[in-house]
Image: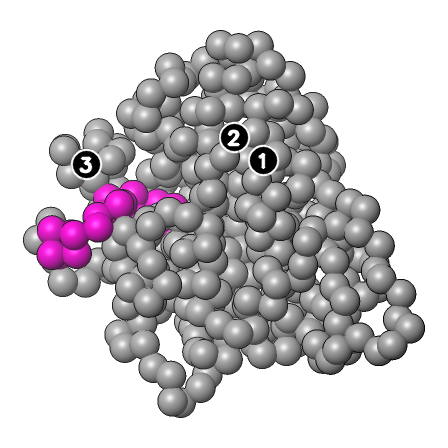
């Protein structure tokens, strides 16, 4: 178990996500690594301005993209309501975000609006559909990028965590596999906030929560993934995700990170191993790998996440939260806080949320 305090770890998770978002603002979405190196040098180490011809053009180093903007909106809602209130969060989207959008990609806070948010905007604003019908088919990590705050808030309450994250996810993404992987990430983050490491034992801890009925995943195996015995009842399926596989992924990534016969060198090439695109099934293995390999080294984890190119902003947000939860806010190098715009205000929000855990 980590020796830093729960509040320090909770605040570290939130600030790690904000730092990851801002750190990748400039070199976001370069799929040609030679082009990224040309524009930003061989190794990105700090916040950078976006290029005029690229995503987020016009923003400055240390500012947040729309993902960070929505995360801050979620934090405000959690803080004001004392927990997750779906009606309040949806109201904030309608009053604070949606009026800034026009349905096109290059629009809104941060200069770019993701597919899942554009689809929710169209269904809610143009088609006047209820919030129960606004979720689209994007297979990306936007829901994780905002619900990680819910995971921190309910780090000691897995049932509430799963229900709140699942409910919030379907506002923008309705695919059951995306929902299950989003809830799984939140469950992983909650254990790190509690003080556990992202290691080969973590998935076992998550499976104990499944067996205890605390996490809504379907599992037929017995302890240690042993086969079911004759006569064992079929576990109830109602309201449960199809399988617990999303909970098993983190420890497999941790095993790869610690196995001396498996080396990804330099570590930024994790983006090539698991894939540079936006989809959640590319992003999560890379984030889990980096967070396991650099569990006590916030700077290395974030810089390797960013320098891998592609959808490095999502990779950095997810990795930043996971590693920040392990190092705590006290373990984040001051320069990352100093260069982040509105850092003091964001830290206050993170600490307010941490006090609720």
Which of the 4 image quarters holds residue 82? top right
Query: Residue 210 vs residue 337: left or right?
Result: right
Q: Earlier in the sequence, mark 1 or mark 3?
A: 3
Residue 59 part of the magenta segment: no
Of residues 94 and 125, the one nearer the viewer is 125
Let me know if residue 349 appears in the view.
no
Q: Which residue matches tag 3?
A: 54
The residue tagged with tag 3: helix, strand or loop?
A: loop
Q: Earlier in the sequence, mark 2 or mark 1?
A: 2
Question: Which element is circle 1 on?
Answer: loop
Q: Which mark is residue 174?
A: 1
Residue 34 visible in the displayed image: yes
Question: Which residue has dot 2 on it?
Answer: 136
Q: Which mark is residue 11?
A: none
- Classify 261 as above or below 31: below
Check the image and name the residue furthest to the left. Answer: 38
Q: Position of residue 183 (x, y in %)?
A: 63, 50
**Span colored in magenta:** 20-37
Question: Which residue is at 70% across, 76% downward?
Answer: 225
Mark 3 or mark 2, earlier in chain:
3
Picture mark count: 3
Q: Is residue 46 above or below residue 137?
A: below
Whether residue 73 is situated above or below residue 18 in the rendered picture: above
Q: CA distance from mark 1 to mark 3?
A: 30 Å
């Amino acid at each position: 178990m980590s020796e830093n305090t729960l509040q320090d770890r909770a605040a570290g998770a939130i600030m790690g996500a904000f730092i990851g978002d801002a750190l990748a603002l400039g070199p976001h979405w370069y799929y040609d690594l030679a082009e990224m190196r040309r524009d930003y040098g061989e190794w990105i180490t700090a916040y950078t301005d976006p290029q005029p011809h690229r995503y987020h053009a016009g923003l400055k180093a240390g500012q947040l993209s729309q993902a960070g903007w929505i995360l801050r909106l979620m934090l405000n809602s959690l803080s004001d309501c004392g927990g997750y209130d779906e009606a309040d969060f949806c109201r904030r989207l309608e009053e604070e975000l949606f009026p800034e959008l026009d349905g096109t990609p290059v629009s809104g806070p941060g200069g770019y609006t993701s597919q899942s948010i554009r689809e929710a905007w169209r269904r809610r604003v143009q088609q006047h559909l209820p919030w129960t019908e606004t979720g689209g088919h994007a297979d990306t990590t936007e829901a994780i990028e905002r619900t990680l705050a819910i995971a921190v808030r309910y780090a000691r309450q897995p049932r509430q965590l799963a229900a709140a994250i699942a409910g919030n996810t379907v506002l923008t993404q309705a695919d059951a596999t995306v929902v299950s992987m989003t809830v799984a990430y939140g469950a992983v983050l909650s254990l790190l906030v509690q003080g556990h490491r992202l290691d080969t034992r973590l998935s076992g801890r998550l499976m104990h929560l499944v067996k205890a009925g605390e996490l809504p995943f379907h599992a037929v195996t017995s302890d240690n993934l042993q086969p079911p015995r004759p006569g064992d009842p079929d576990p109830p399926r109602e309201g449960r995700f199809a399988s617990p596989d999303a909970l098993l992924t983190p420890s497999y990534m941790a095993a790869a990170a610690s196995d001396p016969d498996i080396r990804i060198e330099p570590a930024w090439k994790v983006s090539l191993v698991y894939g540079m695109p936006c989809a959640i099934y590319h992003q999560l293995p890379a984030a889990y790998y980096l967070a396991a390999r650099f569990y006590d080294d916030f700077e290395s984890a974030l810089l390797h996440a960013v320098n891998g190119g592609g959808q490095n902003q999502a990779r950095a947000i997810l990795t930043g939260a996971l590693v920040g939860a392990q190092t705590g806010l006290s373990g984040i190098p001051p320069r990352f806080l100093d260069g982040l715009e509105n850092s003091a205000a964001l830290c206050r929000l993170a600490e307010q949320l941490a006090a609720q855990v």
